[in-house]
């Protein structure tokens, strides 16, 4: 019975792993940050006054926030994936403990 339980948990673990596999590349956002910085550097001398400088700074901030949003979304996906895997690990250990205890109680009778 314990072998069946372990097999089911292992099967669920692998199915969940493959279904929650991240899409595409991850982790290197330096190109996006460099592009935003380059645009800002090219345009930073063009404003004629404080209002135009504020608009330029806002555009730069928006570009950086888009990168931050992508990073946060990726981290959320990774957190969800890890949570599901830990859930399967916990269920596997709990099921094994219950099955061992049940077997020990039957043998004690």
Image (cartoon, helix red, strand yellow):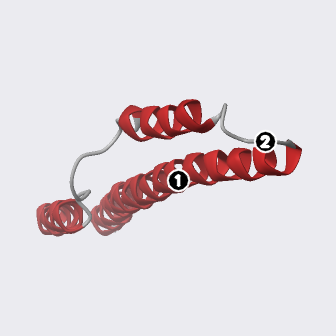
Q: Position of residue 59 (x, y in %)?
A: 64, 52
Q: Is residue 46 left or right of residue 23?
A: right
- Looking at the picture, how far across and down is residue 5, in whole percent? 20, 67
**Viewer-nearest residue: 90 or 80:** 80
Which quarter of the figure has residue 12?
A: bottom left
User: Relative to residue 4, is residue 58 drawn left or right?
Assistant: right
Residue farthest right in this picture: 50
Question: In this rendering, would 27 be left or right of 72?
Answer: left
- Taking the image as shown, residue 64 lies to the left or right of residue 26, namely right
Q: Is residue 45 above or below residue 32?
A: above
Q: Residue at x 12, y 68 (%)?
A: 4
Q: Quadrant of the N terminus?
A: bottom left
Give the x, y percent position of residue 69: 54, 56
As drawn, the label of residue 72 is: 1
Cα separation, mark 1 vs mark 2, equals 35 Å
The spot of residue 30 in percent (x, y) is 41, 32
Residue 82 vs 32, above or below: the answer is below
Does label 1 or label 2 sit earlier along the sequence? 2
Residue 7 numbered mark, or none: none
Front-lying residue, 7 or 22 = 22
| Residue at the spot of label 2 | 48
Using the rendered view, name the quadrant where residue 13 is placed. bottom left
Residue 50 drawn above or below residue 45: below
């Amino acid at each position: 019975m314990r072998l069946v339980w372990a097999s089911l948990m292992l099967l669920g673990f692998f199915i969940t792993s493959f279904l929650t596999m991240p899409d595409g590349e991850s982790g290197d956002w330096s190109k996006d940050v460099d592009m935003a910085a380059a645009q800002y550097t090219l345009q930073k001398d063009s404003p004629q006054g404080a209002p135009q400088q504020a608009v330029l700074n806002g555009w730069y901030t928006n570009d950086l926030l888009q990168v931050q949003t992508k990073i946060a979304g990726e981290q959320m996906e990774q957190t969800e994936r890890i949570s599901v895997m830990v859930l399967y690990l916990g269920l596997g250990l709990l099921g094994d403990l219950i099955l061992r205890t049940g077997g020990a109680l039957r043998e004690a009778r």
